[in-house]
Amino acid sequence: MRPKSASVLCLILCLITLCISCNAHIAVYYKTNWDTVYIHDSIDGGKTWNSVPGDELGTSSNPSYSGWKYSIINSNDLIFDMTNGHDWDNNNGQNYHITDKGAYTLQNGQVAPASKISDCQHGTLETPNLCVCDPGYYGYNCARKGKNCGPHGRDVNGECVCDANYGTCKGVDGICMTDFLNDNSNCGGCGKKCTKGPKVALCQCGSGECHITACLKNYKMCPNDNTQCYPQDYSCGLPGCETYQVPNPAGDLTKDDIHTPSSKFGDYGWQAPRPGDADYDERYGGLSAVMAYGSIQYTDPSMTSANLVIVTLQKHTDDKLVFCFDGKCSSNPQKKYDTSHRDIVNVVVKSTKTGLKVTLNPIRFVWQATPMKQRPDNYEGGKKGAVVELFGWKYTDVARECEFMGKAGYLAVKVQTMGHLLDFHANYGGQFNPWFFNYQPTGYDFESRYGSYSEFIDMVDTCRSHGVGIINDFIINHSTGSGNDMYYHRNDNGGHCDVWGPKTSSQNLFRKNGPLPWWISSGFAYKATPRTGNPLINENPYAALPPSSYHAVYGGSISWNDPLILNAMALSGLTDIDTSDDYTQRRIASYIVEFISAGGQGGRVDAAKHIRPQDLAGIFKYVRKFLGGHIPESMVMYLEVLTGGERDMLIGNPNSPYSFTYGLRKYLLANGFSNEEAKNIMIWDASYPLQPFCDSNYPTAIENDDFDESASTGSTSRDLQDKGVVLTKVGPSAINQHREFEKRLFTSPYGCDNARLKLVLSSYWWYQGIRSVPDGYSDCKMCTGTAQDCKECVGVPYFPAYKADSCGYDAGDGYTRVHRDIQIINAMRQWMGLSDISHADLGLNC
């Protein structure tokens, strides 16, 4: 056995050796005619090397080597080659090798010690020819004050600001040496590695994106596609920039058949990646063979017990599934709960055939929500009141604002869609994560861009404790835009073939290790899916929406007076959900019931006029059934029905079958609704203030300016003319005028005072003409696209939404907070039959 003192001595010597190595440097001056030079090196004896082509060399400031390229490496042993990205100087294949610290020259294949330095001014002379600079100085003799940012950056107040397409991911002391366009370890951004996936032999970073350059044996790349490797017998799809016609297995849309049965889709569906596929992520789980969701079904109107039923669709009917409720597994797909159960329920569905699983949304029952603070009778059980539309507010900010809204007397707050939304961290249509991504859902969750599930629950409970309900923005007419999905698409743009890759979802913001969504749209596709061999077709297994849950795309002329086209058209290119399908009606109803069950009060239905009134009635039939056979008194739903020349068909004509007033009421009554329950389903009257709908038997929701008007360049179907003003379009100069229209909404609305719900929009000011939300996720700091994308990024910085001392109408950048204006608050309270309050009553010093 070695003596203890010898072991200690050995340890000390080892530490000294390591310390000498970590503090040693090797500098290389390189004589070349190449404009750009990279050093491809290893500092551990050749075991590991930096990524090809390597780290870029700077230009020497040493007058003895003027014009030479220069690099300094933290090591006392260096194996290296030089390259310009194409040609190599590698010592005839033997590599160059320097075995001691110091400065060296490389010229004509020969390595030699560099000349001595006589005046190391602000540094340490590590060797006679190498001056290592103190912080704040740089240059061969450490005579230059400031930060050395290399050839692709500049010093700004002691920090390196890099040129476009360069960064400081691995430069010495923050030097801008990382080439985002070509660096395999930082392709398009720091830490974004080009790694070989399944079936891939070689890959290389180019133009800030990873490209496959070679496939493994028995696999191939397709022409103009360096994104995947395919089996040798795989059909590579269409030539040039051609795209498939959108597949419609059922044939053309007709007046008699607007639904495509699942049997007609054959082998088109089940497109999600499987284990072993190049694009598979383990977090996709078993979505390639199983779709599932939880349906809460209360047993009676008291809503004190419920059956949680797990609804599944299977690719393989012989696959036996196991259902795990909070870790307890069996073959039974349902379980009964009552008020004794106080915990959130977590459900996993497992396949016995593949061993893969599908994780469902967390489930909460109505008795678990914080009780709603008692409201005066003036609120008619929650059916009457003012709703604040906090557009673009995070859930955490809404939760903090609810105390104020409760004191002010507001009935409820409308928040952004409960569910994950399209997310694309690069430019899209000239904006970065633009506002209209809020209306492109990728799943039916209860977390989104605006907060996690736990933040959603905290918001609901906090607001209920202050007597404020939560109104969700339900997007059930459509999913994302065609081509905005997790696959590759292309389009001929004036002779240039634009190709774009997968987009992602806001889910990535919160559940890094949870299941990721998978969804497919059929437009702009140019190759078949490896799973089916067929062109893409609309499908969202994560939301449990199969191809039969989508309409065949209508490609004819647009007619706003044709009910069939209104219902089946792909609104603004969005993939249209077939709400006539019974399975789909049940799926959507379960989503709505999940929200009510979690403690929500009601919702707005986006783009409702593109859903047939009888289909809406079918959805609400199941909502009513699943809520124990009744509609809770406080549950209110209002439908976005924009009216123009077709107003009479949509709301005015009592005999119109496509009516969202008279017609919808008839369909609801036919589906078991009482007349009072049916009144809780109302239109948001877009014809206010010019031609408001006035029938006392049909309550409405009305609003001055709405966000759709605010964010668009114009809304011809809702023109306020001289009876309203769009605040954020005009700017702060319109505050006084806008306040008067908001007050009039409550005190003397145009036409009639038939509204049960009156909405106040509190959104945000446009930032330098950009309409993106200032919640931080449209900030260019979040850009992870290509270096060119991020260079051209058009976004808005983060502004906090919650401001405790705001008195309303905060002019400038950020959020408007219109709902905090005391004059508007007291006009609202007058309408509600409540007494006036002061700033002091609200805790404000204004």
Image: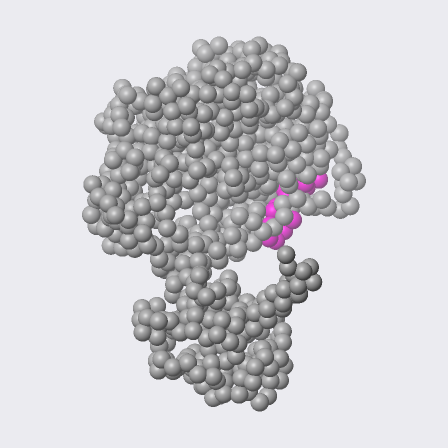
For image coordinates 60% across by 82% down, the residue present is 125
For the question of whether residue 730 can be seen, the reply is no
Quarter the N terminus occupies = bottom right
* Relative vertical location of residue 395 with respect to residue 566 in this rendering, above or below: below
For image coordinates 50% across by 64% down, the residue present is 170
Of 38 and 496, nearer the camera is 38
Give percent across and percent down for residue 818: 63, 42
**In the picture, residue 38 is in which quadrant?**
bottom left
For image coordinates 67% across by 38% down, the residue present is 401
Give percent across and percent down for residue 425: 46, 49
Give percent across and percent down for residue 329: 51, 20
Is residue 268 found left or right of 13 in the rendered image? left
Of 599 and 127, nearer the camera is 127
Is residue 475 found left or right of 485 in the rendered image? right
Residue 21 on the magenta span: no
**In the picture, residue 203 is in which quadrant?**
bottom left
Query: What span is colored magenta in the figure?
Result: 810-828
